[in-house]
Image: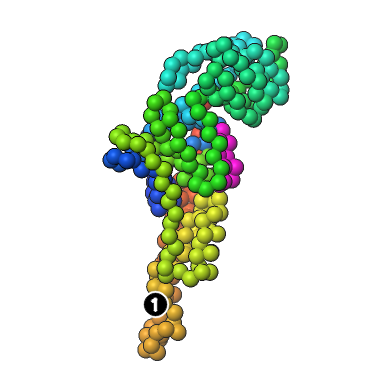
Amino acid sequence: MKKKVLLVFVLILFVGGVSASYSCSVGDPVVEQGGINIGKIENINYLKINLLRVFGNSAADFLVDANKITLTNETPLVEFELLDGVYNVSLVNSTTEYATIKIGSESETINIGEAGDTGGLDIFISSLEGTYPGEDARVELSVGLKYFSLQGEPLAESSTINGKKYGFEVTSAFSTGVLMEVTYCENGTLEFVDVVAPPDPNLNDSEINDSTLGNQNDSVLGNQNDSILGEQNDSVLGNQNDSDLPLEEKKGTGLKGTLVMMGYSFVIALVIVLGFFLIRKFFVKDEEDPEES
């Protein structure tokens, strides 16, 4: 509960301006946003999502309705449950480079760090040790109903999971994880909406270019710093130039402008520091938390 409260605060602080990329033909969409660390599973909008990899802020791989499973010489067969039923996964053979995994009557050989599919499910091999058959085999994998590899912008895609269509969007990416939004419709059909924010008519070409480049930075603090400074600079100064003011008004702008900028600089610094510690507290692994499976 504590982590969820922190996450909501971080989302409000850093992602409040992000528009949803999905809508419903009837009614409003059901949307939930949550944070996932690489290698972990989180439940977002009733779906277990396993984040596998993140590549800067331009690509992310994840499994939906996922289970993390470890196969060894002692336990080469494991039973697990997904939304659409119960399955058995077994280890046929393995080396330090690949593993052959069997689900039901089908099997597939998959290299470490890659995804494959067999038995109607998608599989990702995250770790391989030893050999099987042998005495020291250990295969760590994730298995789920759907594997996604999102690239480009927006980092969004939809798919039908257990009879219901869901939309998935990575709204922010970090070196340790992502913020993800999961959407579905209780009524009607889920529809994708490619939202493009219009340029601010008060900005000139150089300001728009600076804002765009700042938003592409994969650092959360960098993004917020650029956007906050840009917005505050425009609003505080009111896009006014001293050269446009009458002579009488110019005399009072120096001290007033300095005091206003000092006040906003203090607020900006406080917001950035607070946001940094909240994100660090959320994404850094808590050593007291039990290992998720």
Q: Position of residue 116 (x, y in %)?
A: 60, 25
What residue appears at the point 29 percent right and 39 percent down from the top-left corner?
A: 26
Q: Is residue 216 left or right of residue 16?
A: right
Q: Position of residue 123 (x, y in %)?
A: 57, 24
**Residue that mark 1 sits on:** 256
Say if 263 sits above or below 49 in the image: below
Say if 160 sits above or below 201 in the image: above
Task: Kindly give the residue lying farthest to the bottom in the view shown.
Answer: 247
Q: Secondary structure at mark 1?
A: helix
Colour style of the rendered protein structure:
rainbow
Q: Is residue 249 left or right of residue 170?
A: left
| Total labels drawn | 1
Say if 64 sits above or below 272 in the image: above
Q: Nearer the viewer, residue 139 or 149?
A: 149
State yes or no: residue 60 in magenta.
Answer: yes
Q: Nearer the viewer, residue 45 or 246?
A: 45
State yes or no: residue 138 in magenta.
Answer: no
Residue 235: which quarter of the image?
bottom left
Q: Looking at the magenta stretch, what is its main secondary structure?
A: strand
Say if 268 sits above or below 66 in the image: below
What residue appears at the point 65 percent right and 23 percent down from the top-left corner?
A: 110
Amino acid type at mark 1: Lys
Q: Is residue 91 left or right of residue 50?
A: right
What residue appears at the point 43 percent right and 28 percent down from the top-left corner?
A: 161
Look at the image and tell me whether residue 3 can be seen. no
Q: Position of residue 61 (x, y in %)?
A: 55, 36
Residue 135: which quarter of the image?
top right
Tell me which segment is drawn in magenta.
Answer: 51-61
Look at the image and tell me whether residue 94 can be seen. yes
